Image (cartoon, grey):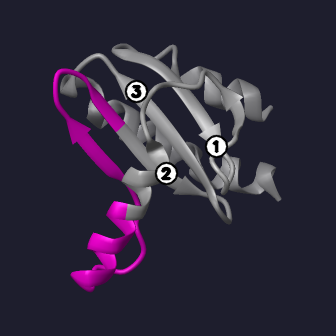
Amino acid sequence: MLQRIITAFSHLPGVRDSALYDGSGELIVGVAGSIDHSALRRCGERVARDLGLGALEEIWVESAGAVVIAPVGEAETLCIHLDDATSIGRASHELRRTRPIITELLR
């Protein structure tokens, strides 16, 4: 079930690949990319904490491509790599919709 949910992100228009990593950065399911998701997550958590914004929900990075990184479960990180920024909204919506299911499956 977890594999199907993570793989389903890759079927969204504009999504190159998606992967779920454990707290140590090891791939759980999906396609491992070249993005340093751990460093981006730590940076996002630090910014959210320093600005008093509470817990990190998502990080969006736009460049020649785009990426959505989000904490799920206890220490796991979901990384969605996109062709460009036009698909960020859809990827983010699907992430928010499936996050409770992913979290429950990780227990």
Residue at position x 42%, y 75% in the image: 55
Say which of 105 and 83 sits in front. 83
Residue 29 against residue 104 in the figure, above or below: above
Find out whether residue 94 is within the magenta segment: no
Residue 65 image position (x, y, % from top left): 24, 22
Tell me the CA gap for discs 3 and 1. 14 Å
The first of marks 2 and 3 along the sequence is 2
Asked if marks 3 and 1 touch (Cβ < 8 Å), the reply is no
Residue type at mark 2 is Ser
Q: Which residues are magenta?
A: 43-67
Say which of 79 and 27 sits in front. 27
Say which of 96 and 10 sits in front. 10
Quadrant, the C terminus: bottom right
* 2 sits left or right of 11 in the view: right
Residue 81 numbered mark, or none: 3
Tell me where residue 16 sits by quadrant.
Answer: top left
Tell me the CA gap for discs 2 and 1. 9 Å
Say which of 50 and 52 sits in front. 50
Residue at position x 28%, y 45% in the image: 60
Residue 21 numbered mark, or none: 1
Quadrant, the N terminus: top right
Tell me the CA gap for discs 2 and 3. 14 Å
Residue 38 numbered mark, or none: 2
Residue 54 image position (x, y, % from top left): 36, 80
The first of marks 2 and 1 along the sequence is 1
Residue 47 against residue 71 in the figure, above or below: below
* 89 sits left or right of 74 in the view: left
Asked if marks 2 and 1 touch (Cβ < 8 Å), the reply is yes
Find out whether residue 65 is within the magenta segment: yes
